[in-house]
Amino acid sequence: MFNDIQRVGFAGLGAMGAGIARRLMDAGYEVVGWNRTKEKAQPLLDAGMGWAQTPRELAASVDVLFTMVTNTAAIEATAGGADGVLFGLREGTVWADISTIAPDASVALAERVRATGAWFLDCPVSGSPATLAAGQMSVMAAGERAAFEHIEEVLRAIGPRVTYIGPNGQAILTKVAINLALVVAVTALAEGVALVEKAGVDRTAVVDAVLKSVIASPVIGYRAPLLVEDADVFADVQLQQKDLVLAQDLARRLGAAVPTCAAASEMLNAARSSERADRDFIVSVHDAYVRMAGMA
């Protein structure tokens, strides 16, 4: 049914993808990579990662394939066409897509993969490059349970917190729920900080108190400090709002209510006009609140 795992492929070597690929290499796996821009992969190539010229070549040369690209359009471009993954998959290969894409598109892709004799898991992760570096990344997986169990050890090399959710599509649905809650929580924090700044409270002191409070969490832990020292970008407004759009689209199809999601998305719309819109979204949103309060 399955091939023995000897080579692991990774397509999409952005900041997070490159970090995951490196963890797999550090765990002893032979990793072969592909990225639209080869220059971004140079540090990994220097460290011994193999290289494939196309997604098709990558899929044909590995036993487990990971993809981590920006959105639904990007995964469809990687999958289709003469040089796409679907033309390279071998029977028994497990393709685990880490991307955050539209759930219905993920389920449709699983059907196309099944027709090749390979297996598809939607396999999103929760965390940031900081979480990954600390060895605290969480991984969700959905699809055939046998395929999940076959690559579970590989997934645990990415992060120790691995959860099997259910049939294809259910892991990406869970990721949509998690990211909805994440954006709402971070947006609410930016709102609260800006509110008491308007009252004259020092921002640095507020952030310090937040990190010692009951609302402290992993995401607040690495994002709140950016309000004091804008030192990193985990996800900008455009990337983070993509997740809210997925949640709103899902809610419309299901007839579900997501009012806090809608409110947070409106604040991200306002943050797009910030001069700091290219920074992490907590910085951009806070800047929008500051401007709305007349403090800038």
Image (cartoon, grey):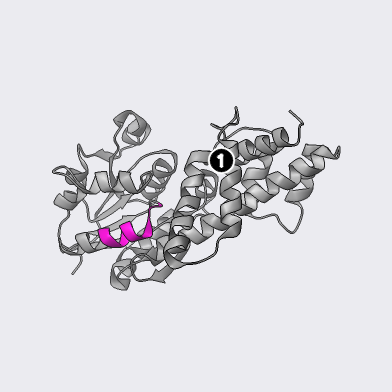
> x, y (%) of residue 236?
52, 38
Q: Nearer the viewer, residue 152 or 196?
A: 196
Highlighted range, magenta: 100-109
Q: Quadrant where the N terminus lies?
A: bottom left
> x, y (%) of residue 252?
45, 61
Q: Which secondary structure dominates the residues rendered in magenta?
A: helix
Give the residue at mark 1. 269
Q: Nearer the viewer, residue 94 or 266?
A: 266
Q: Quadrant where the C terminus lies?
A: top right
> x, y (%) of residue 55?
22, 44
Q: How many circles with numbers are drawn on the protein?
A: 1
| Residue 97 falls left or right of residue 261 | left
Q: Amino acid at mark 1?
A: Asn
Asked if the magenta segment contains residue 184, the reply would be no
Q: Is residue 159 visible?
A: no
> x, y (%) of residue 139?
45, 59
Asked if the magenta segment contains residue 103, the reply would be yes
Would you identify the image quadrant in which residue 38 lies? top left
* Residue at position x 33%, y 67% in the image: 168
Give the vertical position of 10 relative to 288 (above or below): below
Give the vertical position of 123 relative to 77 (above or below): below
Would you identify the image quadrant in which residue 273 lies? top right
* Residue at position x 29%, y 72% in the image: 146
* Residue at position x 71%, y 36% in the image: 292
